[in-house]
Image (cartoon, grey):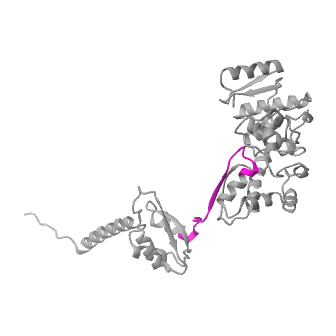
Amino acid sequence: MVVRRRPKPLLIFLTAMGSFLILLAAVYLFLVSPVDKNDHQTIEVEIPSGVGVRGIAKILKEKELIRSELLFTVTVKSKGDLYLKASTYLFSRDMSMEDIITELISGSQYNPEAINITFKEGMRITDYAEVIAKATNHSETEVLNTLNDRAFLDGLIQKYWFLTDSILQEGIYYPLEGYLAPDTYQFYNKDVSVSTIVETMLDEMEKKLEPYKNQIQDNVHYYMTMASLVELEGTNAENRKMIAGVFENRITANMNLGSDVTTYYALQYPMTSDLTSAQFATVNPYNTRAANMRGKMPIGPICNPSLSSLKASIEPTDSNYLYFVADKNGNIFYSNTLAEHEQKVQEIKDKGDWIW
């Protein structure tokens, strides 16, 4: 005869309690997990001031960012005397409840009024003024007036080692031309001051130039001017270094640089069509085609160059070339003599690859 033992009440209780706790843990993990781990789309959530934990829980539940208002409230209060900051946040349904609480504690970095302004390489100050005017509450005239304000410029020269009195020479169109680092910048809102934008760009330029400070600080205006020339004459790091070397050779030989892009800048014309012989001969401290510019650089930069062009101006490629010409496809051809150069120009024209 088999005698069956009846389960002890304590064992039954412990088994049931264990199962209950496992179930409770599973439910808890489910409730605090992301509402949808595959939904990465951001949702703007405004947490008003003084709303309280329960109010925040209600907002998050309505946005379908948490599964349980009660659990959110209990979890926050169980962590002690926390302060959830009022702000505008960007959350997503792939965030866990803990992630959301952590961000509410630290405060949002999201600013719906923030603006991004992109300044492209090779653009002039006047182009930058137009970009700023379109992105902010300032007019182009206001921007240009600030950029030419003598008191403002004197303060900048005191602040930045790479800005010297060379930028204030008589004949300079825009003193900060060439010194504003092309990049994409974020500002708090459209009311950002022009001076803040300018100093932010100069801060970035300082970072770019710092590794080369010992090489260029004695004649930084020269290098910035050279960088602006090769930015517009070249198409990549290699040929910009080569072109910088050609310009150095021409200066050493007391020749005109003969750079067409300087004539366009001197006349403040867009580079969209060819110029006349008379225009190329215009006497102007920027125009390196003019007869009085033998062995001379332009008085200052003619655009705001890339880091690639800055490096090219500092470390040009050594060669014996004195001439170069580009076709409409961006190919650049180098020559040692004027006869070779003129022959190459004719070949390009005969092929139909002349730039105009």
State the residue in front, 108 or 79. Answer: 108
Classify residue 255 by image quadrant: top right
Is 15 left, or right, of 267 in this rendering?
left
Q: Is residue 326 magenta?
A: no
Could you say where residue 208 lies in the image, as x and y percent from the top left? 75, 47
Quadrant of image for the N terminus: bottom left
Could you say where residue 22 lies in the image, as x and y percent from the top left? 33, 66
State the residue in front, 23 or 60. Answer: 60
Classify residue 34 by image quadrant: bottom left
In magenta, the rendered stretch is 104-127
Quadrant of image for the C terminus: top right
| Number of numbered markers | 0
Q: Residue at x 77, y 54 (%)?
A: 202
Q: Is residue 106 magenta?
A: yes
Q: Residue at x 68, y 47 (%)?
A: 120
**Looking at the image, residue 19 lies above or below residue 338:** below
Q: Residue at x 56, y 76 (%)?
A: 83
State the residue in front, 83 or 18. Answer: 83
Is 334 left, or right, of 168 in this rendering?
left
Residue at the far left: name it. 1
Classify residue 8 by image quadrant: bottom left
Is 168 left, or right, of 333 in this rendering?
right
Is 137 left, or right, of 212 in this rendering?
left
Could you say where residue 108 lies in the image, as x and y percent from the top left? 57, 67
**Looking at the image, residue 100 lies above or below residue 348:** below
Could you say where residue 25 lies in the image, as x and y percent from the top left? 36, 67
